[in-house]
């Protein structure tokens, strides 16, 4: 993605490609905040990107609502990310050092994806993520109650 741009993608293959580019481009930090249905997608279609980022030393922070239904996927996520629980999460977005992506999910797939590397918007979304992270509960505390 070229500097200071934003785009909206609708094609499934383009969405997956953009997510993979986002994953490959992370250098130090990657934060994801997703609803309770997306952990299955994270450990399915795009898991390799998480594993590769972890190998590169990227700090991966992941916020979702941990439920009985997604617990197996969350246990998988714990292997490559710091996981926290936040009840009632709506929407799906991720933030890195240089980029922000947000997706709309219907059924088992993302139907659109906003991708942006405008510095001011990336900083703004990092602030939103950090605020949510502070409110979220560490996964081990939530898992003990599920």
Image: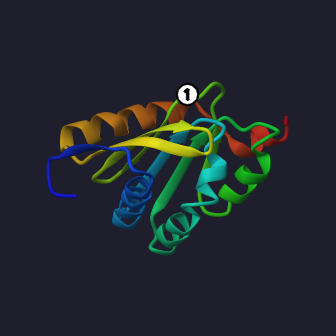
Q: Residue furthest front?
A: 11
Q: Is residue 128 above or below residue 27?
A: above
Residue under the point 17% across and 46% down: 5
* Position of residue 24 in the picture relative to residue 111 (left or right): left
Residue under the point 61% across and 44% down: 38
Q: Position of residue 91 (x, y in %)?
A: 51, 32
Tell me the element at label 1: loop
Residue under the point 65% across and 40% down: 37
The residue singled out by tag 1 in the image is 90
Say which of 102 and 146 sits in front. Answer: 102
Say which of 111 and 64 sits in front. Answer: 111
Q: Position of residue 131 (x, y in %)?
A: 45, 31
Residue under the point 48% across and 59% down: 59
Q: Where the N terminus falls, by quadrant?
A: bottom left
Q: Quadrant of residue 120?
A: top left
Q: Residue furthest left?
A: 3
How many numbered discs sit on the rendered protein? 1
Q: Residues within 10 Å of mark 1 (few under 14, many from 20)?
A: few
Q: Quadrant of residue 112?
A: top left
* Position of residue 87 in the picture relative to residue 131 (left or right): right
Q: Position of residue 101 (x, y in %)?
A: 37, 45
């Amino acid at each position: 993605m070229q500097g200071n741009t934003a785009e909206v993608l609708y094609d499934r293959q383009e969405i997956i490609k953009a997510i993979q580019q986002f994953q490959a481009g992370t250098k130090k930090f990657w934060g994801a905040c997703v609803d309770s249905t997306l952990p299955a997608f994270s450990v399915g279609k795009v898991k390799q990107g998480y594993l590769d980022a972890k190998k590169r030393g990227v700090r991966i922070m992941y916020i979702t609502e941990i439920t009985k239904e997604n617990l197996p996927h969350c246990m998988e996520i714990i292997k490559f990310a710091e996981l926290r629980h936040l009840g009632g999460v709506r929407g799906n977005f991720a933030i890195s050092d240089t980029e922000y992506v947000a997706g709309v999910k219907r059924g088992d797939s993302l139907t659109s994806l906003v991708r942006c590397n405008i510095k001011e918007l990336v900083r703004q979304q990092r602030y939103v993520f950090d605020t949510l992270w502070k409110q979220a509960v560490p996964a081990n505390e939530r898992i003990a109650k599920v």
